[in-house]
Image: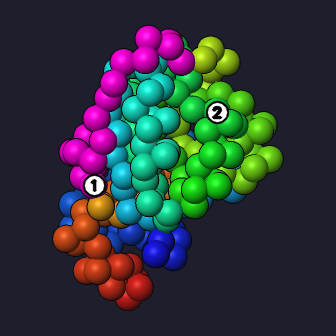
Amino acid sequence: MAPEPVPTAELADAANAPIAMDGRIKPVWRGARLAGPAFTVRTAPGEHRAVREATEQAPAGAVLVVDGGGAVDRALWGDKMSALALERGIAGLVVDGAVRDVEGIEALGFPVFAAAIVPTGPAGHDLPGDHELEITCGDRAVRPGDVVYADADGVVVVPAADHADVLRRAAGS
């Protein structure tokens, strides 16, 4: 079950260590917010296959967190993937890479946080990637099961082992 959204600023204040992703990872539509355990993906820049596979494999309530190498010349996500993710109950997407079809994503109400928006689609070389391993996204280490929160202020990653303590401290602030 996905956690209730908590403002990222409150979580960042309550953490004993830096938990915020780099500010270049932003919501692609106003009002987007998400919360849930990370389902991690590493893919070659501009390659879509691992992202598509993760969307089909991740459990409902998960947040897909993608290490796209920070490449922003080709989109790894769009409105068709958002529709599939919604059908599967995915809580949202955070990608250190680019996305497209922003109006369609917003119309669906699917929360997406990305480094950039470009109209160019994936490379199409169909190179494999990896799932459910430690990655780097937005200059922050993310492990499978870490809890990801995102809102207008940005994205934070709360290590799974610290989650209960950070939530308790955030509630007391």
Q: Quadrant of residue 101?
A: top right
Q: Position of residue 90 (x, y in %)?
A: 54, 57
Res 144 label: 1
Q: Position of residue 50 (x, y in %)?
A: 40, 32
Q: Residue at x 22, y 72 (%)?
A: 162
Label 1 Cα crowd, 10 Å radius (few <14 / some 14-19 / many 20+): many
Q: Residue at x 44, y 60 (%)?
A: 59
Residue 127 shows in this picture: yes
Q: Residue at x 35, y 39 (%)?
A: 41
**Viewer-side residue, 37 vs 13:** 37
Question: Magenta includes 140?
Answer: yes
Q: Position of residue 114 (x, y in %)?
A: 52, 37
Which sits earlier in the primary sequence, circle 2 or circle 1?
2
Which residue was labeled with disc 2? Answer: 78
What is the magenta range? 122-144
The quadrant the C terminus occupies is bottom left
CA–CA distance in space, label 2 to label 1: 23 Å
Badge 1 amino acid: Pro
